Amino acid sequence: MTAPRFIGHEIYRTSSYGALHPLRIPRVSTVMDLGRALGWIDRSNFLTSPRAKPSALELWHTPAYVDVLQRAERNGTVDADVRARHALGTTANPVFAEVFRRPATSAGGTMLAAELVAKGGVVHVPAGGTHHAFPDRAGGFCYLNDPVLCLLALRRLGLGRLAYVDIDAHHCDGVEHAFAGSEAVRVISVHEEGRWPFTGRLEDDAGGAAFNLPVPRDFNDSEMRAVLHGLILPRVAEVRPQAIVLQCGADAVTEDPLSRLALSNNAHWEVVDALRALAPRLIVLGGGGYNPWSVARLWTGVWGVLAGQPIPDRLPPSAEAVLRRLRWPGARAGKAPPEHWFTTLRDAPREGLVRPEVRARLARLAAR
């Protein structure tokens, strides 16, 4: 079993979806900088992500779609037919300078992660987790579905029992589509009810492959703990997975602008830590997250958990400086970041009641 590895790339520092897009903010590059400032990332555990070749992407995406993505990058635009057919050049999925290279790099990272854990181990790929893309179209800021490509790469390595767990605020519609009816991949998604893409209803089981838990607004740490022990851990354990892929989107925390959930980053770290014991291989991806401070602090803490590093009570000056340099263009005027966003990784816990509707939904899933 190899030591934990972190996969990143400088492309995430220099590319942007555009000045008005929710993904205009720095995310992976800040995690890299924070990890290095804390002494948690260095040449011994950092790997530069390769860019997946078109032939590798065609493991799930159609050749026509892969070609369209490359042409969109070369031309800097798409025509109306491509926009309608492949959902490219839209407000959610704009054409930007690295519209092929950036998602292909994320896909290359998750497929490399599959190879790295072949003999066991854990890998963090915070640039991964783009779970909304379909074989021939983009969706929800996602151009390529790197979780699907990661899982298919694991299958090609001969692993016949896989678990995919998704705790992003948004349902993993593309991943569920890929593995509907599968006996090899169990899909578990915990996501906000009534939130785009409006899929993943409690009764939707993807032909027996999926367990979907839509959760109510203000979903708190105590409720996530109940979900962890009442749904995620037992349903993962019963398939005895040879590998687990966790999509650890950071958009379910209180401060995120694109959800109405109320988790602290402690809840995510608890899920990461608990899943490590259930399989010899664990790959943790990123996903959503649209507040630059909460994303950076959460995913850096994920890496700390995986690498066995204690979360410090107070960040050293070099790490604090990374967070103080962040800017959030277009954020609500008049709301200055609180001081703890600069000085700590750990949020204050957000415990609360486990509401009857959450218990009832867990009971329905437990009865399946």
Image (cartoon, helix red, strand yellow):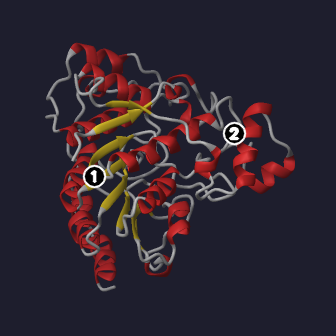
Whether residue 170 is visible: no
> What x and y, as percent, mark residue 287?
45, 46
Q: Is residue 211 left or right of residue 197?
A: left
Secondary structure state at the residue bearing disc 1:
loop
Placement of the C terminus among the 4 image quadrants: bottom left
- x, y (%) of residue 227? 27, 66
- Determine crowd level at label 1: few under 14, some 14-19, many 20+ residues with C-alpha closer than 10 A: few
Q: Earlier in the sequence, mark 2 or mark 1?
A: 2
Residue 292: in sight, yes or no?
yes
On residue 119, the disc is 1
What is the tally of numbered marks visible in this picture?
Answer: 2
Residue 240's spot in the image, x, y percent? Answer: 25, 71
Q: Is residue 7 above or below residue 265?
A: above
Q: Nearer the viewer, residue 51 or 106?
A: 51
Using residue 278 as the reference point, say whether residue 300 is left or right of it.
right
- Between 130 and 110, which is closer to the camera in this rendering? 110
**Residue pointed to by mark 2:** 94
What SS does tag 2 mark? loop
* Residue 320 sits above or below residue 128 on the image: above
Give the spatial CA distance, label 2 vs label 1: 39 Å
